[in-house]
Amino acid sequence: MQKTWRSSVLLAYSLAVLAFLYLPLIILALYSFNDSRINAVWTGFTLKWYQALFQNTRVLEALTNTLIIGFFSTIISTALGTTAAIALHRYRYKFKAVINGLVYLPILIPEIVMGLSLLVLFSQAHLPLGKPTLILAHITFCVSFVVITVGARMEGMRNDLEQAASDLYATPWQTFRYITLPLIMPGIIAGALIAFTLSIDDFVISFFVAGPNSTTLPLYIYAMVKRGISPEINALSTLMMCATVSMVVLAEILQPRHHHHSQEE
């Protein structure tokens, strides 16, 4: 009886936490289909706000910029972060603790401080603000998340398979290609997913380093909100939310396959 009571309380608490986290998102998505421009009044179901979005050239331009910046920053930060994670967890060297601490620094530094520092850096380097500076800025804060994600995967990885490959006269590249890479692939996928999500969602740092013709979706939403919250903003935010959820689901589908493949290897 006491166990049932505790289970009911924990269930109710869990549902309350989930409602607190997801109820605002559900309301946002619901009112993106509202026929009225006033969010406080529901007048009927419609898709006209989504149609208006895809007919808005500024939205399409911001979407294109967001995807381009997110793609290149994800590819580069994933490659750099994976390489750094392997180096940090495979080799011993002086000041390892200091370097590991520096990896966390971009995560701990407030975004407004990092955005301002990057703006000063680009100004001193005489780099014109635009897509290249946005990509460089996004790489700066995405690399740390990739390092941590891939590193967490390597922490729980068995080393006996790599040792066995070396005993069978496999070259370091063959060991990495057929043993290490399949084992850490779930971590790489998760790191890339986090990097892409952070890139397309970033506002503060992008606000500092964005230039003409490099407006991203978060910057465009901010500009629209200053004129008042409209159903177009709800629709655009809902699409971004659905894209993020889709990436999470895709990563969860792909990870078991790579894990199974690594076991077969």
Image (cartoon, grey):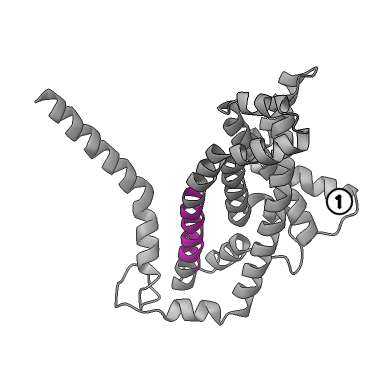
- Residue ID at (31%, 71%): 41
Q: Is residue 114 visible?
A: no
Q: Amino acid under label 1?
A: Ser
Q: Residues within 10 Å of mark 1 (few under 14, many from 20)?
A: few
The spot of residue 7 in percent (x, y) is 19, 31
The spot of residue 25 in percent (x, y) is 39, 56
**Looking at the rendering, in which quadrant would you find the C terminus?**
top right
Q: Is residue 4 visible?
A: yes
The spot of residue 197 in percent (x, y) is 57, 52
* The quarter of the displayed image where residue 178 is located: top right
The spot of residue 206 in percent (x, y) is 68, 54
- Residue ID at (78%, 46%): 118
Q: How many marks?
A: 1
**Looking at the rendering, in which quadrant would you find the N terminus?**
top left
- Which residue lies under the disc numbered 1? 123
* The quarter of the displayed image where residue 31 is located: bottom left
Bounds of the magenta segment: 236-252
- Residue ID at (67%, 24%): 163
Q: Is residue 27 left or right of residue 115?
A: left
Q: Nearer the viewer, residue 92 or 168?
A: 168
Q: Nearer the viewer, residue 217 or 85?
A: 85
**Overall secondary structure of the magenta section:** helix
- Residue ID at (60%, 64%): 217
Residue 251 magenta-highlighted: yes
In this view, the residue farthest toward the front is: 168
Q: Is residue 14 above or below residue 204?
A: above
In this view, the residue farthest toward the top is: 94
Q: Secondary structure at mark 1?
A: helix
Q: Is residue 136 above or below residue 95?
A: below
